[in-house]
Image (cartoon, grey):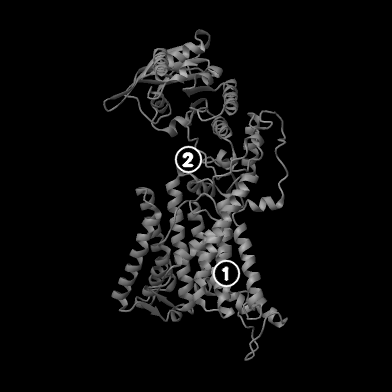
Amino acid sequence: MPPPAVELKDVSKYFGKVIALNNVTFDLRKGEVHCLLGDNGAGKSTLIKILSGVHVPDSGEILLEGRVVHFGSPKETLDRGIATVYQDLALVPLMSVARNFFLGREPLKRWGPFTQFDLDYANATAYRELNGMGIQLRDAEQPVGTLSGGERQCLAIARAIHFGAKVLILDEPTSALGVHQASVVLKLIAQARARGIGVIFISHNVHHAYAVGDRFTILKRGRSIGTYPKGGITRNELLNLMAGGKELVDLEKELAALGPASAA
Amino acid sequence: MRRPPNIIIPSIQRDRGRMSVGTHDERVRSVSVLSRLLGRPELGAAAGALLVVVFFALVAGGSGLFSAKGIVNFLEVSAQLGILAAAVSMLMIAGEFDLSIGSMIGFAGILIAIPTIAWGWPIWVSILLAFAVSMLVGYLNGLIVVKTGLPSFIVTLGSLFMLRGLTLGITRVITGRTQASGIHEYSAHDWIAPIFAGQVFQGPIRWLAEMGWIDKRPSDGLPIIQGIPVSILWWIGLTIVFTWILMRTRFGNWIFASGGDANAARNVGVPVARTKIILFMMTAASAALFATIQVLVTGSADTLRGNLKEFEAIIAVVIGGTLLTGGYGSAVGAMLGAFIFGFVQMGIFYTGIDTDWFKLFMGAMMVIAVLFNSYVRNHAMKSR
């Protein structure tokens, strides 16, 4: 069996007195969607920041295709094929889809003694790539501001795939979306998996995660409380593990005691 | 607020046929020429330019405003402001202001005059010095803005005052006065003068006069204008180059991104700080160019030159459709804004209306232009 695309071994991270991550082990294979679930403050953000090179772990190892690596900067991890799509998406609303698609990596062509931005290529390529991933665009020159939230998310993911991401880290890609829009993004994630890309899908929405995930790792208060394959756990079990089933039962009781609406 | 609030397309329209696979999207309707035009930032300024031309043609048609001399007069005013506005438009698209250019003009003018008159430098060396020092100040403006994160409005407001004070102080210490004249003496036979203060197309103008299209002077029979002031070529040339940079180069993409969302731009690897610093150096260079042209045309330098030019340039740029918050705009729009500015100023002069009213008009024009531009922009973003 080939080594995982990326692997964390006993990684810990402290911020002053706070233990943000405590001996977390995590691995991602090529062509799988590994969901990282947890409530706020569970350590999801710290984990992806370590994977994307923003933070350096205080202990533990990062392995890339079986070899120990040290990420110095987000730029370096990007160069190694690990792309992170943050919630702000790094898109400029007033600029066109194509200009955003190639922002920072503009294709150039010679024009006499000058070098200019090859806009025809950018427009055609952005349109073709997005269409190829099932994202229907009216026109690659329309401003990103006219796109819906789901379309923007897809654009940011498609951009990362186009520029050669082998590992894709998606930070809550569906959290602000409606049902239909979220389904479009989930389909795109499935497509990325079909291309052999490893996807780390961070979410606190178990329904979205369960729909597309192959394995699930649940973080709680900085610790991993286990990794489960899809066949080994049901959606409800996952929900209980994540939110803490006991907490929910307690909450239900508490709410019931509060008002007459619960009588219904 | 970076994005106009009501540009979200109704969801029914947006979602129809979402996942259908095909090469043609049935939601693409053929976009009319008018709709395409509405998407351009210059539209408001173009309409405004047309409006003022028609207005003054009606009220001042026979006053000489539209004679060859009148046209050259207002174009020269427009050109000088337009040189500033072209550079300012790029900086404003990148989301920053440069208020220091007003006193930079007086500063650069003195940097040309003093070494030439007091120290006997060749004038081209003095001009080189003026450009170099101005761009250094521009670099410092930019560096302070990107390093401290302070608003450029405040940083350059500081340099506006500091440069004016510095210029007055230095000039008084060295010359005992606050202005320097008689520069024609030094520039008249210098090779560099025609580049900044010459007249071009003298041949075609003479030919047009022979054909009777341009009036001749009764005294000697020569055309009433010698040629076209070269500053007009600088204006048009810079606008073309800057438009190319904005629309067709990688740097242009970075300018829009730096102003549209600097954080997003940084996250995808755009060197936002470098982009902004270069643009501050370009606005400084445009002020030095303005000063060079004025010094060589008038033959004098004055420490108070350029007063309020920083705001006039912003007015021209804003009339031209550039968003104050950055990320959207054009150099052609700035050109039209500068045209309106020069045309109305000279138009009011030719009409015989007291020129006191000019500023009232331009201020109102700017507010109307901003309202119109934001209306059109919202409409255009929706209709696409």
Name the residue: 57% across, 67% down: B340
Mark nearest the camera among 1 and 2 is 2
Which residue is tagged 1?
B232
Which residue is tagged 2?
B264
Across and down, in percent, residue B289 comes to 47, 66
Q: Which amino acid type is marked by label 1?
A: Ile
Give the image quarter of residue B107.
bottom left
Using the rendered image of the protein, determine whether residue A3 is visible from the camera's viewpoint. no
Name the residue: 46% across, 70% down: B292
Eyeballing the image, is B124 above or below A43? below
Name the residue: 65% across, 45% down: B383
Q: Which amino acid type is marked by label 2?
A: Ala
Judging from the image, mark 1 belongs to the subunit labelled B
Q: Helix, strand or loop at disc 2?
A: helix
Across and down, in percent, residue B67 comes to 64, 79
Residue furthest to the bottom: B219
Work out whether residue B365 or residue B267 is closer to the camera in this orientation and state it.
B365
Spatial CA span between label 1 and label 2:
38 Å
Using the rendered image of the protein, determine whether residue A75 is visible from the camera's viewpoint. yes
How crowded pointer 1 is (Cα within 10 Å; few <14, some 14-19, many 20+) is rated as: many
